[in-house]
Image (spheres, helix red, strand yellow):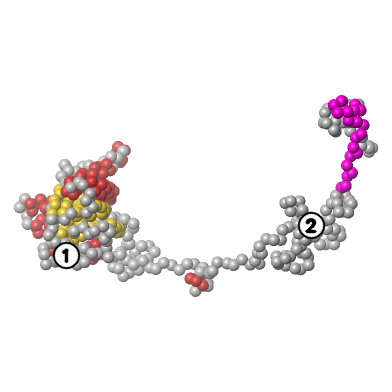
Amino acid sequence: MSQMPQQAALSKCPSCAEPVEPGDLFCGACGYDLSVVPEPPQDHPTLTMNGSATGPSGDGVAWPDPEPDGSGTPPAAHLPADLAGTDSGGGPLPEHEHESGTDPHAQGARQPAGSGVRFDRPAEPDEYPLQAPDPRVAENPGSTAVPEEPAQVCVACRAGRVDSDGYCENCGHAQPRERDHMERESGPVAAVSDRGLRHHRNEDAFAVGHTALPDGTPATLAIVCDGVSSATRPDDASTAASQAAGDALLAALPRGTHPQTAMHEAIVAAAQAVNALAEEPATAREHAPHQNAPACTIVGAVVASGLLVVGWVGDSRVYWVPDDRSAPAARLTEDDSWAAQMVAAGLMSEAEAYADERAHAITGWLGADAYELEPHTASFKPDRPGVVVVCTDGLWNYAETAEEMSEVVPADAAARPLHSARVLVGHALDGGGHDNVTVAVVPFPAPPQGAGSA
């Protein structure tokens, strides 16, 4: 059974909002007549339950008429523009005759009354422009792949193409990995190192650099190290030694340390770095008890203030080659080797000693199992310009005497040290490349700061 709505009892005065008790006829605070209760507001439903619009004219929302049932067509979609809308201030939006076929974005177009969508947005194109086509692809419409990079040229023969496996299709030489062939240039000094043609890895390393003395005069340096193949981790030893010696020289020379003293300290620092490599866990020695500690040779040169300083331990060498080839070249180091000892003792001639199979057995090296460390240093004051060649036996085996080295050093070596180092490495590879080969070229005197290879 339906019931008529009853007048609700008041809990507070409609006038002053003070609480009132049920049955009170007047408010005890303001005297308001509580029997005068306003009628409930007239209800104007916007839609009847069947979905058709009702209510007085102007009230409610004028939804479009539904499609007849069974027409087979889907109901019409209600668009946002079908709804009445107001702007942020509560006023109606401008009229716009969107059904008249006029361009809603044209200047002066009017918004429809009650439209709920703003039509003053910038016009959007029917199609968006695409990025310009790649001209490389346009040349070959059937393929979208980017053309391959130019073929790599062999570092050994300088003519053959390198295949995908890393071998030269002309001479078969395996192309270098990152350490297999290294080139570096620092100001006027440059160095190149190559694995060679017979060894499976490069055990040589080098460091080159340039700095300034306290009075501002330039100084250049080069360090070359040759790992001892019969020792464990020779490549790590040469790397550690060259980095330690190079860093020590770059730190000492700007402080005003005499170059010969700085060279001695650099070799000691290199020896300590190699010795540290032997500090491995005891378990490693248990698995390989007969392995020698990491070891390498070292040779270096510093050019500063008209002075040429060299230092070495082992059988890597330094050569002096003047620009004027009519002047004599010279070898500035003495090998720590069996052959050198035989010659020094007068037991063999140099030719006989170096022809012996024991010739390259070294008697001095850097490493934890080396004999007492005895760094060799010497200083020279050349009276003419030239270049200093710092190298491992991988080069001097193919140009042993100073005269032979002078013949293979390019005439413009002082102006183009990097090019010259490449030429010297190429000379060793052409000779057979039986060993790793590393060479640094240092111009004398040291050019002003900023000078380098042409």
Q: Residues within 10 Å of mark 1 (few under 14, many from 20)?
A: many
Residue found at x 12% / y 60%: 383
Q: Where residue 175 appears, x then y in whole percent?
A: 33, 62
The residue closer to the viewer here, 195 or 81, is 81
The structure residue drawn at horizontal position 5% and vertical position 52%, both measured from the top left corner, is 346
Say if 328 sits above or below 39 in the image: below
Q: Quadrant of the N terminus?
A: top right
346, 297: nearer the viewer: 297
* Residue on which the image places disc 1: 323
Q: Could you tell which of marks 1 and 2 lies nearer the N-terminus?
A: 2
Does the magenta portion include 75?
A: no
Residue 291 seen in this snapshot = no
Give the residue pinned by disc 2: 114
User: Which secondary structure lies at badge 1?
Assistant: loop
The answer to whether residue 408 is left or right of residue 287 is left
**Residue 58 at least partly seen:** yes
Residue furthest left in the image: 346
Residue farthest to the bottom?
A: 139
Quarter of the image for residue 292 reads top left
Region in magenta: 24-45
Name the amino acid, label 1.
Asp
Front-most of residues 175 and 266? 266
Give the amino acid at mark 2: Gly
| Image coords of residue 87 (percent x, y) | 74, 53
For label 2, the SS is loop
Mark 2, other Cα within 10 Å: few <14 / some 14–19 / many ≥20: some
User: Is residue 44 rendered magenta in the image?
Assistant: yes
